[in-house]
Image (tube, rainbow, N blue to C red):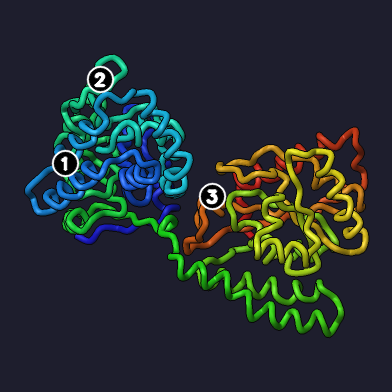
Amino acid sequence: MKPLTSDINSILQGIYKSPTGPTVCAFFDLDGTIIAGFSAMQLSKQRLKSKDISLQEFLRTVNTAINAATGKADFEDLLLIGADAWKGRNHQDLMAMGEILFHKKIINLIYPEMRKIIKAHQQQGHTIVLSSSATCYQVEPVARFLGIENVLCNRFALNGEQLNGELCKPLIWGKGKAQAAQQFADCQQINLKDCYFYADGNEDEALMHLVGHPRPTNPGKNLARVARARGWPIQRFVSRNNNGALRSTAGVISVLPFAAVGVGLGLLKRDKRAILNYASPRWIDRMFKINGVKLNVIGKENLWAQRPAVFIFNHRNNYDAFMAAKLIEKDFTGVGKKELENHWLTGTIGKLADVAFIDRADSKGSVEALKPIEELARKGISICLAPEGNRVDTELVGDFKKGAFRMAMAAGIPIVPIVFRNAEMIAARDAAVMSPGTVDVAVLPPISIKNWTLKNLEHNISEVRQLYIDTLTDWPKN
């Protein structure tokens, strides 16, 4: 029987049609399922970087991994190396290390599709379990971030708060993971036939057979073969399969030929803005094509309804500003972080566009730095910026700062909201490279500031922010 390979929308629809309540349980694996790749690899890299791993431990790990691949060692042998290496270490110190690792690395590896799936199960009132063979130091920070209360994972034995070099049994791995899930379900009086299991590993087959709704996610070769034979729906996600350094570099340096032509036009017209107006939209379009990024835009007519304008967008990653720039196309400036001013690319673009690079820690200096932007707006130049200020890792909307709206009032120009629905699909919050994907964009009608005053400013900002929330909650059909 051939299994269905579902896209995210049909997966979510299936969850929302399922029975509600805590007697339905959804088990989620971590590595390769919730996150791209392996948390253990990120942990090893961090330990190597901080010189927290000895040469002896490193060689033992490599040798055991090779033996495990050839059937001469098993997963317990790998865990025992870690238990022995960390013998005597403080448990809370290691938990803190795991939290740092999560916020530095792991958070950017979480599949946005899996966040949507977990959220859908939570909205149905289902019991959610993060069941992973990784250690608590890797798993628990992820569970906290995703709002998952139940965790089944491997743990090291303690004497007080110190690791004693032993493993807690039974191990969460293969049949052991299936048995732990059975015990959890029995304790919660949950029937496994009403449960879901999302996992990628061949070793997860045992639990797949026990649940009523097996969901192989990015499955390995053997699990995919079993899934096809049994008709289990396979789901594969690529939103964290980042483009390599070569493709990313090619996208960046593709600016050079467009810049060369732009410089020629600028010299001919004796206008530095002509350089940017020619090169910017063409370069960004080429960079996105090289990286497989597309924009699905609703409300394009609102981009040109009134110019100049203050274009605002919800800030999710390092690339949504480029998406906004692609949409606005020409005759605009913006606001950026002070540290970007000295970057060879953003600094050069900023100088051509008269961008105001501000130090957020210096409120008074920031206000002064924005005054030239207001003057440009009065002369017909639009402004583009994110009122949230910092990148926000949420599907909702962060608090709006007043700067964008005060500039609109000072220049007497309208506000045009640009709403990005799923910018996280092409890049995580701090990602340095993009992944192929399509971002949904809604450009809302211009908002007049004619009757805005300092007295009603906060109320009006709140209403604009609510427009973002409403749009993201009920996306426009056309």
Q: Which residue is pictured at 50% across the width and 61% down the height? A: 434
Q: Quadrant of residue 131?
A: top left
Q: How many marks?
A: 3
- Residue 21 appears at what percent x and percent y? 38, 28
Q: Indicate which disc, 1 or 3, sits on the residue closer to the N terminus.
A: 1
Q: Nearer the viewer, residue 425 or 233?
A: 425
Can you identify the residue that label 2 sits on?
158
For badge 1, the amino acid type reads Phe
Q: Which residue is pictured at 66% across the width and 57% down the height? A: 321
Q: Is residue 262 above or below residue 333?
A: below
Discs 1, 3 touching: Cβ within 8 Å: no
User: In what element is the residue under mark 3?
Assistant: loop
- Residue 49 appears at what percent x and percent y? 39, 45
Q: Is residue 270 visible?
A: yes
Can you identify the residue that label 3 sits on?
430
Q: Which residue is pictured at 80% across the width and 40% down the height? A: 402
Can you identify the residue that label 1 sits on?
75
Q: Is residue 445 visible?
A: no
Q: Quadrant of residue 241?
A: bottom left
- Residue 272 appears at what percent x and percent y? 82, 73
